[in-house]
Image (spheres, rainbow, N blue to C red):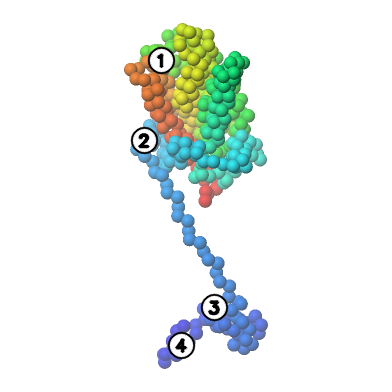
């Protein structure tokens, strides 16, 4: 409403509005038509209420350690997508049968045109690492069942099952962690199993050649232990890179981490079975080691051993490859590959070295170091996923 010079209120029409009954033009605030009396209120429709905009999720900035790793690798990771604590905390979440089945299907039923998610459907802000804890629990229930059959029922036929379940439990569960974290889901799980089982005997065979050529290698002093690291990490690295080059669906950092973890997990599992056979059964009277002692010790240390060392090598190779390039052996000459590779070799060597520290403390510290670096590469892989979405023209909302 406005007023004339004399002060009389005048109606101001912001837009012409006509009566649908007689067609007479009406002011905006008219409740009924001034000519025919048709109710004009029916012509106005209130605007739907607008919900308040959701606050943006806080971005976790990089810490000093991430900045240090950025300086070493030449990468530019600016935020953290997932932390180790979030991985551990996810194991406490409970799901019903339908939810568990759906989550397992998404992990294990993948790699085909119908089961590979579109980039626009992948969310890097809703990562839940859960199946690893579920499968690990299943492995240990099976192991305890076998131990019950051997120790309580006094049946030696349970020994092979106890060794297999106990040796494979932690390494295979760690492998599933990399399956879960690989949100691309482009590599079928049966291919992961192929890399798991074939990677074991191939890398062990190459390592045996190395030990034959370098007989000085062995656990004990630092130099001999470093030679063990050089031989075994080179053997696993060669097989990992062969698999990456041959796997056409391996295009991203998360894929390289997964294939490297498959090779390392199988290497560690079969190595544990060998230790049980030699030191826990054949030479137990001399060594004093029991099957349970070796299973528990190797199970506690497995996350920081071969599966982590090989995953780092596979991820570093894919960092060098970058977007769209073809995997080539020339990538191994890049400092971005050599630095993580040497890191795996050194950690492996120190792991086998006799130091004036309790073994569980020394190897626990080395596990913390390797997983700090691995989490950096996992987050690099998730950053690459977001970059792939941008290249594909999709935006995460």
Among numbered discs 1 and 2, the one appearing first in the sequence: 2
Among numbered discs 2 and 3, the one appearing first in the sequence: 3
Q: Are marks 1 and 3 in contact (CB under 8 Å)?
A: no
* As drawn, 98 above or below 291: below
Could one spot residue 327 in this view of the protein?
A: no
Instruction: Check disc 4 and report its element: helix, strand or loop.
Output: strand
Residue indicated by mark 2? 65
Q: Position of residue 226 (x, y in %)?
A: 40, 16
CA gap, disc 2 to disc 3?
62 Å
Q: Position of residue 178 (x, y in %)?
A: 52, 32
Mark 3 Cα within 10 Å, few/some/many (few <14, many 20+)?
Answer: few
Disc 2 vs disc 3: which is toward the camera?
2
Number of marks present in the image shown: 4
Q: Splitting the image into 4 quarters, where does residue 73 fall?
A: top left
Among numbered discs 1 and 3, the one appearing first in the sequence: 3
Instruction: Check disc 1 and report its element: helix, strand or loop.
Output: helix
Instruction: Check disc 3 and report its element: helix, strand or loop.
Output: loop
CA gap, disc 4 to disc 2?
70 Å
Q: Nearer the viewer, residue 74 or 397?
A: 397
Instruction: Check disc 2 and report its element: helix, strand or loop.
Output: helix
Residue displayed at 58% across by 75% down: 44
CA gap, disc 1 to disc 3?
86 Å
Residue displayed at 62% across by 88% down: 35
Q: Are marks 1 and 2 in contact (CB under 8 Å)?
A: no
Residue indicated by mark 3? 15
Residue indicated by mark 1? 225
Q: Residue furthest front?
A: 152
Among numbered discs 4 and 2, the one appearing first in the sequence: 4
CA gap, disc 1 to disc 2?
28 Å
């Amino acid at each position: 409403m406005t007023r004339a010079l004399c002060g009389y209120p005048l109606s101001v029409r912001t837009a012409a509005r006509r009566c649908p009954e007689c067609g007479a033009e009406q002011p905006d605030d008219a409740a009924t038509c001034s000519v025919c009396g048709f109710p004009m209120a029916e012509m106005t429709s209130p605007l739907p209420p607008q919900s308040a905009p959701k606050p943006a999720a806080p971005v976790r900035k990089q810490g000093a350690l991430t900045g240090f790793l950025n300086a070493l690798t030449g990468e530019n990771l600016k935020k953290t997508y997932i932390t180790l604590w979030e991985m551990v905390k996810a194991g406490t979440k409970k799901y019903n049968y339908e939810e568990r089945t759906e989550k397992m299907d998404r992990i294990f039923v993948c790699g085909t045109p119908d089961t590979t998610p579109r980039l626009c459907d992948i969310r890097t802000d809703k990562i839940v690492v859960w199946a690893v804890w579920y499968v690990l629990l299943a492995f240990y229930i099976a192991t305890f069942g076998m131990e019950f059959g051997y120790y309580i029922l006094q049946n030696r036929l349970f020994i092979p099952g106890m060794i297999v379940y106990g040796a494979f439990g932690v390494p295979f569960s760690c492998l599933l962690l990399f399956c879960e974290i690989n949100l691309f889901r482009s590599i079928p799980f049966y291919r992961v199993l192929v890399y798991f089982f074939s990677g074991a005997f191939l890398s062990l065979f190459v390592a045996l050649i190395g030990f034959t050529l370098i007989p000085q290698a062995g656990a004990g002093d630092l130099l001999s232990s470093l030679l063990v690291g050089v031989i075994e990490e080179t053997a696993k690295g060669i097989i990992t890179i062969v698999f990456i080059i041959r796997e056409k669906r391996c295009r991203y950092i998360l894929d390289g981490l997964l294939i490297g973890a498959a090779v390392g997990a199988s290497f560690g599992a079969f190595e544990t079975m060998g230790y049980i056979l030699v030191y826990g059964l054949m030479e137990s009277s001399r060594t004093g080691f029991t099957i349970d002692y070796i299973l528990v010790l190797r199970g506690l240390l497995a996350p920081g051993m071969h599966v982590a060392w090989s995953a780092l090598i596979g991820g570093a190779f894919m960092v060098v490859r970058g977007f769209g390039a073809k995997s080539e052996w020339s990538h191994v000459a890049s400092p971005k590959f050599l630095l993580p590779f040497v890191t795996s070799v050194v950690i492996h060597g120190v792991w086998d070295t006799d130091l004036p520290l309790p073994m569980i403390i020394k190897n626990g510290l080395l596990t913390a170091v390797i997983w700090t670096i691995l989490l950096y590469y996992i987050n690099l892989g998730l950053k690459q996923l977001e970059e792939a979405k941008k290249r594909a023209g999709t935006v995460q909302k």
